[in-house]
Image: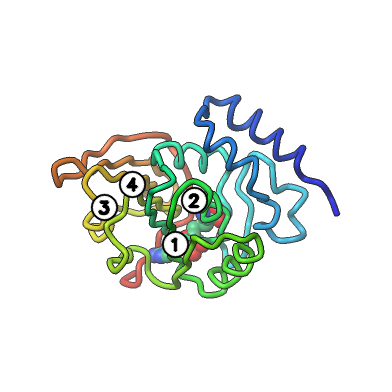
Amino acid sequence: MIDFSSDRQRMVDTQLRGRGISDARILDAMLRVPRHEFVPEALRAEAYEDHPLPIGDGQTISQPYVVAVMLESLQLTSTSTVLEIGTGSGYVTALLGELACRVFSIERHADLASQARVVLAALGYANVNIVTGDGTLGLPAQSPYDAIMVSAAAFEIPSALLSQLREGGRMIIPVGSPESQQLQFIRMHNGQPVISLRDSVRFVPLISQRD
Ligand code: SAH
């Protein structure tokens, strides 16, 4: 058994704290969640490196720093109900499970969804639910959400997701073309989305059933 805790500590110190991530709950959660459990076995030695990694089905686990930036924007508390779009490996789902009360996560690839379910159950995350389906539709039955995190790039913000955010709720989503995207942060204020532009990023595309 390789001990990855010093790799994880280095990731938090250099990639996160060193670049201005200061939210103690997020730094602690990223110190706790064993990211190497969420990457293919052959890539475990790279699990704490400063870049995305392939996880199968042409998809990727996001760069740790981008995950931290997105999580920080959502201002989660131990009472938050969160919706995640794009479970992928389940790594972010685990972090959301640490930071929030209840987590619902939607993944369109059934095999990625079932693999993530197995890893999350083995690690003891009992407050996360993974649903296979089209995340652009959200999950109205469990709405409204305090926060929505979208881990795949949309051409435009899906209106179904906006309608499932509670008043004061926050959403972070990469928006743009496959080559160039920008994170958009949305806060629901008096029933209207207030949008601000954040970092430039590169995510795999958000594919809706209609595509
Ligand atoms: N947070 C994940 C990132 C996975 S990449 C991780 O850290 O591992 C984005 C994921 O979004 C992919 O697994 C892809 O299959 C999924 N995806 C793309 N379009 C989707 C949609 N419409 N609904 C649900 N999941 C979608």
| Comes first in the chain, label 1 or label 4 | 1
Q: Residue furthest front?
A: 79
| Comes first in the chain, label 4 or label 3 | 3
Judge from the rendering whether residue 112 lies leftward or rightward of residue 42; answer left or right: left
Identified at 40% across, 72% down, the residue is 133
Say whether marks 1 and 4 touch (CB < 8 Å).
no
Residue corresponding to mark 2: 96
Residue corresponding to mark 4: 171
Q: Position of residue 6 (x, y in %)?
A: 77, 37
Residue type at mark 4 is: Met
Q: Is residue 113 above or below residue 197?
A: below
Taking depth in this image into account, of 193 and 202 the one nearest to the observer is 193
Judge from the rendering whether residue 176 lies leftward or rightward of residue 25; answer left or right: left
Label 1, label 2: how many angstroms apart (C-alpha)?
Answer: 10 Å
| Comes first in the chain, label 3 or label 2 | 2
Q: Position of residue 121 (x, y in %)?
A: 61, 66
Badge 2 element? helix
Q: Position of residue 81 (x, y in %)?
A: 37, 54
* Disc 4 versus disc 3: nearer the observer: 3
Say whether marks 1 and 2 touch (CB < 8 Å).
yes
Say whether marks 4 and 3 touch (CB < 8 Å).
yes
Residue type at mark 1 is: Ser
Residue type at mark 3 is: Leu
Badge 1 element? strand
Locate the N terminus by quadrant.
bottom right
Mark seen at residue 105 = 1
Badge 4 element? strand
Badge count: 4
Residue type at mark 2 is: Leu
Label 1, label 4: how many angstroms apart (C-alpha)?
Answer: 14 Å
Label 1, label 3: how many angstroms apart (C-alpha)?
Answer: 15 Å
